[in-house]
């Protein structure tokens, strides 16, 4: 496995690159008319920059040969204080993507590893994710398990 890559925390200045990766991710997933985009790449850049500046959204990037080839986002969700338990935030993991050329090299595991290390450092209570069918095995290898505690209304 080629491990010639570097994982780092994303900064607000990385918003243009993160937005382009997000668009690549969603184009890869999209079934339908690709010309019917609802949001522009510029809007995505602005959204990402603002969220990273605010500090409740975090992201990690993986670079290989000087180019960004993947990312994962973490949103820290505050919990209402209570008298008998810690008020550590929940972590919502989302927008996990590695470009096809960098898959199967350990980039995805390294991204999740960096995110999980941060979550431990800030004492995040729980990490949650809605995985794609293709990412379930990687999440499971990275320590994510099915929940018996979560209910969902659609």
Image (tube, rainbow, N blue to C red):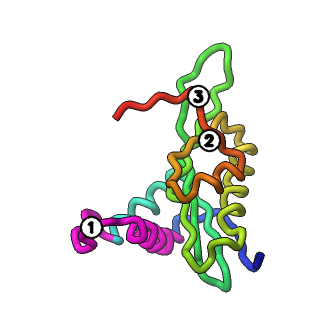
Q: In which quadrant is the C terminus drawn?
A: top left
Classify mark 1: helix, strand or loop.
loop
Residue 143 % position (x, y): 71, 46
**Between 126 and 141, which is closer to the camera in this rendering?**
141
Q: Which residue is mark 2?
A: 127
Q: Position of residue 105 (x, y in %)?
A: 70, 73
Give residue 102's position: percent from left, percent from top.
63, 76
Q: Is residue 20 left or right of residue 88?
A: left
Distance between the alpha carbons at the discs numbered 2 and 1: 32 Å
**Residue drawn where x is 59% and y is 80% of the image:** 101
Q: Is residue 73 above or below residue 106?
A: above
Which is nearer the N-term, disc 1 or disc 3? 1
Q: Position of residue 19 (x, y in %)?
A: 44, 69
- The span shown in magenta is 14-40
- Residue at 60%, 82% (x, y): give it: 67
Please tell me the numbered disc located at residue 58: none
In the image, residue 87 sits, relative to residue 107, either above or below, namely above
């Amino acid at each position: 496995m080629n491990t010639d890559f570097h994982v780092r925390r994303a900064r607000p200045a990385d918003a243009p690159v993160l937005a382009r990766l997000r668009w690549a991710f969603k184009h890869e997933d999209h079934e339908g008319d690709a010309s019917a985009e609802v949001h522009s790449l510029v809007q995505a850049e602005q959204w990402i920059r603002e969220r990273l500046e605010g500090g409740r959204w975090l992201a990690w990037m993986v670079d290989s040969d000087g180019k960004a080839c993947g990312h994962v986002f973490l949103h820290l969700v505050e919990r209402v204080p209570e008298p008998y338990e810690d008020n550590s935030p929940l972590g919502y993991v989302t927008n996990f993507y590695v470009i096809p050329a960098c898959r199967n090299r350990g980039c995805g595991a390294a991204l999740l590893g960096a995110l999980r290390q941060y979550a431990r450092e800030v004492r995040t209570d729980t990490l949650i994710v809605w995985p794609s069918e293709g990412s379930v095995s990687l999440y499971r290898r990275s320590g994510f398990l099915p929940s018996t505690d979560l209910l969902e209304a659609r």
